[in-house]
Amino acid sequence: MLQQAMFGAGCFWGVEATFRKIFGVADAAVGYAGGHTENPSYKDVCSNTTGHAEVVWLQFDPTKVSYAELLQVFFNNHNPTTLNRQGLDVGTQYRSVIFYYDEGQKQEAETAIKNLAASKKWPQPIVTELVPAPVFYRAEEYHQQYLKKQGRDHCEV
């Protein structure tokens, strides 16, 4: 049975492309979550007034990839110490956030954050938010698999 996961780690194009490469990820979609506006558009979210983060929603097969492994991919592919920023992208929509679907995911994420902080991989404190999964609003179709449509497999900085 497939399970869900949702992560915000900056611009959703690269995050989606990264997770799509993971064996056991059955589906990935980009969208918006965590704000106060219903059915926001990309333009709305970019106005930095909706409270939404750019996120990737996943369906995964836990017999092929564990949630802990997805957390590792999440933390290995962005800087969890920069508040409301990833690379050149600045704004609350680019925040580092884990939206958990159940207590098991919450506990695994808390452990992953604690272990990452203890590892001293990052000299600054981890600022990743950990909150219950809200409604996921699927982004406009032109954002889905955007990098693939552009003939790329990663974002260029």
Image: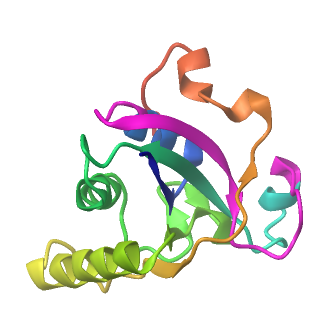
User: Who's the residue at 25% across and 44% down the image?
Assistant: 63
Q: Position of residue 77 (x, y in %)?
A: 33, 52
Q: Which residues are magenta?
A: 20-43
Q: Can residue 123 be spotted in the picture? A: no
Q: Residue furthest left?
A: 119
**Quarter of the figure with residue 116:** bottom left
Q: Residue furthest front?
A: 1
**Quarter of the figure with residue 84:** bottom right
7 sits left or right of 48 in the view: left
Colouring of the image = rainbow
Q: Position of residue 16 (x, y in %)?
A: 50, 40
Check if residue 33 falls in the magenta segment. yes
In depth, the one of 118 and 90 nearer the eye is 118
User: Who's the residue at 13% across and 85% down the image?
Assistant: 118
Q: Position of residue 82 (x, y in %)?
A: 43, 73
68 sits left or right of 119 in the view: right
